[in-house]
Amino acid sequence: MNSKNLSTQLRSSPSTLIVSVLVSTLISLLASVSAFAENSDSVSISANTQWVNQLGSTLTITAIDSSGLLSGNYINKAAGYPCQDTAYPVTGWVDGTAITFNTLWINSTESCNSITAWTGFYYNNEISTLWQLVEDGATSTSQISSGSDKFTQQTSASAVSKLKK
């Protein structure tokens, strides 16, 4: 059968046309469902969660509003840095898997005269970030410290009970 005969046969058979449309619609539907499933699995940054980085520091996300505005606190455990073992306020944004947050290292007990900002993404049950820390009085970008942190969600019963207090 040549292409001319096939073309003529397809035009003359309404059932073939219906089957083609149904198959095309089914393929589109499956692609849409698959894309939705991938997106819904990857968005896992939510409020009332606690995340611990490789140095033992803890990010607690207490709220994320409908616009993505994040609030919470950060407890520093990084050796060699001051302002440790007490909570400092955190603000930031979440947009799907993207996240940014920062803290002004001032609370009711201590001031370290600095600000740290983290920016990163959620993937594979972790938040991977790059951070920059600047101290009050800096006069050059060479005085900005930088690094990276990888946060893993804390899921133990003790972490959950701490969040509720």
Image (cartoon, rainbow, N blue to C red):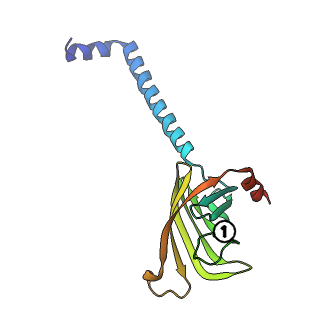
At 43% from the left edge and 81% from the top edge, which residue is drawn? 142
Pick out the residue farthest to the right: 165
Q: Quadrant of the C terminus?
A: bottom right
Residue in front for this viewpoint, 131 or 150: 150
Pick out the residue farthest to the front: 79
At 56% from the left edge and 61% from the top edge, which residue is drawn? 54
Residue in front for this viewpoint, 47 or 153: 153
Is residue 66 toward the left or the right of residue 162 in the image? Answer: left
| Residue 3, image quadrant | top left
**Is there any visible trace of residue 85 in the rendered image?**
yes
The total number of labels drawn is 1
Q: Locate residue 21, reporting x and y percent.
A: 41, 23
* Crowd rating for badge 1 (residues with CA inside 10 Å; few <14, some 14–19, many 20+): some
Is residue 18 toward the left or the right of residue 54 in the image? Answer: left
Q: Is residue 3 above or below residue 91?
A: above
Type of amino acid under label 1: Ile
Q: Is residue 4 above or below residue 52?
A: above
**Is there any visible trace of residue 68 in the rendered image?**
no
Q: From the image, tell me which residue sits under label 1.
A: 75
At 67% from the left edge and 67% from the top edge, which residue is drawn? 73
Q: Locate residue 124, reporting x and y percent.
A: 52, 48
Q: Locate residue 95, reporting x and y percent.
A: 55, 56
At 48% from the left edge and 69% from the top edge, which residue is drawn? 147
Kindly state the secondary structure of the residue where label 1 is placed: strand
Q: Is residue 54 above or below residue 31?
A: below
Q: Quadrant of the N terminus?
A: top left
Is residue 47 toward the left or the right of residue 128 in the image? Answer: right
| Residue 154, image quadrant | bottom right
Q: Locate residue 20, reporting x and y percent.
A: 39, 21
